[in-house]
Amino acid sequence: MSASHQSAPFEVLERLSGNATPIGPDITAHTDVSGAVVVSTCNRFEAYVDASSPAAGIAAARTAITNATGVPADVLDSVHEVRQGAKVAEHLFAVASGLESVVVGEGEIGGQVRRALDEAREQKTTTSELERLFQRATETQKAVKNSTAIGRAGRSLVRLALELADSRITDWSALNVLLVGTGAYAGATLAALRERGAEAVSVHSPTGRRQFSTKHGLPFVPTDEFPAAVAAADLVITCTSREQPVLSAATLAAGGFDGSAMIIDLGLPRNVDPDVADVAGTTLLDLETIRVHAPLEELQATDTAREIVRDAAAKFAGEGREISAQPAVVALRKHVFEVLERELARGGSDEVAEALRHFTGMLLHTPTVLAKDAAANGNAEDVFAAVETLFGIDARPAIEAQAPAECPVFRAS
């Protein structure tokens, strides 16, 4: 199931992405599901499922997501879309390349897709097909970045937020900035602030981690000083993964806020309680507002990037079809070499044996290549039929156990 900024209300995305419990293990607990990778970002929630059938994958994902997030099943049913085969690869490759992002070409999503696979590995919910799918997605993302201008034209959410703030800020170097959070967005936020000339930047981590502030030589704000630091800041940027807001009107009141400040909330779930917008002197800029002001796509760069994505998806599908014929090829080679070894066991010199093994390998080369070509063209069944007809080998049980299962992605429509 996938909900994105293009199709789902912000409130639904917030509930889906705000869940801290891993969902992949619950999806794979279904007997007909062998693997799952969940991609969860501030503007997207997707489950890639390797299952025996699309129906099994849908049922497992639907149940697991509803149980974990509390989003009712009827809400999921009203937005989900199932993709299979090459459509799955094309969608994921486009997502990883930033083509489906709020800010087309933004760079954070590629890392988020890679981290989703890493998390699935830690949770032991990947399969060989999902590994191949996500590794190809990373390769495609790099190809798009290196071959088109979309990566250079695209702006990150952080940079877009700061651009929106530009109209209210006359001198970045004079700002007192408080950065809340030390995760993936923190580094990008700090870099964007420094590009604009911001100098006085302090850091607060809701978990108390000081490594980020120490690494970058920034003052650290402990929890007991947080309200006062917020009240004294001209600009507050939050980017944590906390499920509950870390900043509210009560926080401002506790710090004695009586001035003016811009507060940028890059968190999902929200890091800043909406009641902050009601405090006199504050301007709240959150993801929903940023989404409204996202720039139009760079058409030429996007068209080129999508062509790269389509080609990569077609290649991925061809590789998958080639793989589908492997059990027949393996069975054939095993059969032929077993017959050869039985005959060699009757006697003969080592030189003759080595020559016969080489000859047999050469003899099997052409059938192997032709089998792969046939499979790549969608004729894997003909390969199995030929091996069975000519050699009496039924390799179909092997393909049932080894072939890539359906890999649906559930996406809001």
Image (spheres, rainbow, N blue to C red):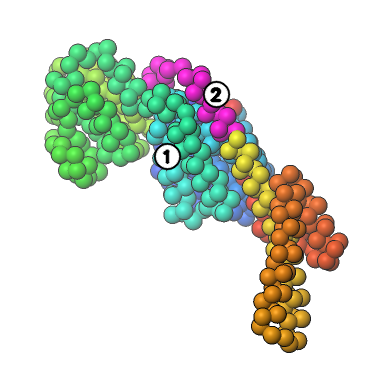
Q: Residue at x 62, y 55 (%)?
A: 31
Residue 59's x, y, as percent? 62, 43
The residue sitting at the right extreme is: 389
Quarter of the C terminus within the rendering: top right
Question: Is 189 above or below relative to 117?
Answer: above
Residue 64's x, y, as percent? 54, 45
In the picture, measured across the screen, residue 341 lies left or right of residue 46, that is right
Residue 134's x, y, as percent? 52, 45
Q: Which residue is mark 1?
A: 112
Type of residue at label 1? Gln
Question: Is 138 above or below relative to 170?
Answer: below
Front residue of this view, candidates 179 and 397:
397
Q: Residue at x 24, y 32 (%)?
A: 190
Q: Which residue is mark 2?
A: 303
Question: Mark 1 or mark 2, which is nearer the start of the sequence?
Answer: 1
Region of the chain picked out in magenta, as a range: 287-310
What is the CA distance from the residue labelled 2 to the residue labelled 1?
A: 23 Å
- Residue 412 in the magenta stretch? The answer is no
Residue 262's x, y, as percent? 24, 19
In the picture, measured across the screen, residue 351 lies left or right of residue 195, that is right
Residue 313 occupies quadrant: top right
For numbered disc 2, what is the local secondary structure?
helix
